[in-house]
Amino acid sequence: SMSTRRPRSWALRPRPEDLEDRRLLSVVYRGTDIDGDTYELKLVGGGDLRVTALNAAGNPATPNEPALIDKIEIGGPSPESTRLIGKVLQKGPNGDGRVFFQTLDVLGGASENIAGANGMLAIDMPDFYLGHTSTTAPTANQPAGEIRIPDGIVTLRFGGIDTTFTPPGGTPLNQNNMSDQFTVTLGLPRTTGTSIIVNKVVTDAQPAQMPSGQPTQDSATFDVTGRLNLFQANEIDGNTTVTPLPNGLQGNGGTIVVSHSDPSGTVTGQIGFARVLGNATNYSVQTNDKVTGFYIGGETNNVHLLAPNGSRLIGFGKGMDTANILTHAIVNLRANRGALNSTVQVDRNVGNVAIGGDVVDTRFLTGLRQNLAQIFQSQQLPMTAPRAQPGGSFQSVLIAGDVTDSTFSASVDPGADGYGSSDDLVFPHGFINAKVEGKIENTLAGAPTQKAFFAHVVNLSHGPVTPPEIPEAPFPHPNAPPNFPRVAKGLQPAGLSSGNPPATAGHATTTAHRAGLTAHPTGSSARALQGKKTTPHGQAPEHR
């Protein structure tokens, strides 16, 4: 018998997964920067956009007139779909490829249909930098530049903050005798948490005008409510001559990244990864909870970490120089080179420490009662040194160099002459397991000349030590697209935007900082820092 074929239905029955994912293009704004760069801002997915640009005379600019952006305002966004996309279309003959703006406001408000507020999905404008674009000097109580998104955003990617930018006819902020503040304030988004990706943050300072006076410190503060999934920058620059106070707390200048609980206390300020791929100067990361990964790939100068509930992975691609770490516990701390003029203070224990060079003028202290939550809340350090408590230990310390004028202690309260004297109060159960390749020399007052490890039990050996392999610049895949777990929602595909704009409109370039980013570190150490499965290129799987 012959089989009969079932009649084919010609009706249109599209399956949901075959439908187009269309986005409503709301507003397009095109303008020309003061140095001749032409740019475009597109709002996609609902809401409205208003851009206020002022010409050199301080008046509203006419179309195609070179001007600086005073305000970018977004009203009525959708937290699931609204994206602001910005890019430089064509670099002017005298342009630098950067577009500066002074204020960005997102006006969301409470939702009428769903519990929560109407924040945004993403802002993606890697060529746009926050700076003081007005020729009028900022007042003492007003930020010199700010981004305000009180109802939250999932992903914020922009060029960064430059406190040294000066508009034509303006006074440089490092010459106005004021401590100028730039702020990025992000509320709690409806889902996912917050991620911030920038190319560069630059802060500066001004020396004291009188011998008895104080220097003025400009600052850039990222204030995030709720979980901060990722903060990533290519570099953090600051003044190395007039440095802020060596505590990394707010109000002292430099670049500060802060994540804290929402007003109800329901969501903590946990930080996933805080990564600087290059050098970091006058840089501080704070949370009222814990930090999964803290990483600096280049040179460090006056960097700080405050994590009251602990830190999992701390890595330095170069050395750990003038670093100050206050935390509850540490699982792994690694530095490819040595440690210089640094302090690590821990409430409880440290798992593994690996230093690839000499340790000089550095203190690793565990088993301390620090009251870190109070320090975060008050932004003030106590007047007296923390006292010892039980629970301090080092599971493993590996040093591929000498130890000079440095201290490693586990639950030891030193006497008046410092560690190593007969007045030490040594708590039971504190222990240190250490291996040092070089020699130990200690000229600290009261300390034995060849002793640097102090605990109830110290297991110290000497021999070869293999330095760690924390990823460091230059990275092997500089042109890789920006792929991040749970981060890349709403970002442009690689190639649509570039940290270095094309020479002619519409011509995409391939640069070392594509989309304002440098590729992720690679290798096994990178996987340890990321804590996630990686592709053969060393990058976390993409989730869009």
Image (tube, rainbow, N blue to C red):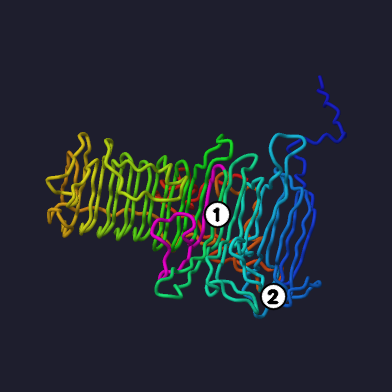
Location of residue 323 in the rendering, given as x and y in whole percent from the top left corner:
36, 57
Callout 2: 10 Å neighbours few (<14), some, many (20+)?
many
In the picture, measured across the screen, residue 35 lies left or right of residue 472, that is right
Image quadrant in which you'd find residue 98: bottom right
Picture disc at residue 255: none
186 left or right of 39 in image: left
Residue 34, numbered circle: 2
Task: Name the quadrant of the C terminus.
Answer: top right
Q: Is residue 384 left or right of residue 122?
A: left
Q: How far is disc 1 from disc 2 in space, using C-alphas?
A: 27 Å
Closer-to-camera residue (252/108): 252
Label 1 sits on a secondary structure element that is strand
Residue shown at 52% from the left, 52% from the top: 231
Of 383 and 451, which appears nearest the observer?
383
- Magenta segment boundaries in residue numbering: 226-254
Residue 391 in magenta stretch:
no
Q: Earlier in the sequence, mark 1 or mark 2?
A: 2
**Magenta stretch: includes residue 242:** yes
- Residue found 18% across the figure and 47% down from its top: 415
- At 60% across and 74% down in the image, what residue appears? 166
The residue that disc 1 covers is 222
Q: Nearer the viewer, residue 173 or 405?
A: 173
Q: Furthest residue to the top?
A: 1
Q: In which quadrant of the rendered view does residue 182 lie?
A: bottom right
Q: Is 387 left, or right, of 78 in this rendering?
A: left
Query: What kind of secondary structure does the magenta stretch mostly adopt?
Result: loop
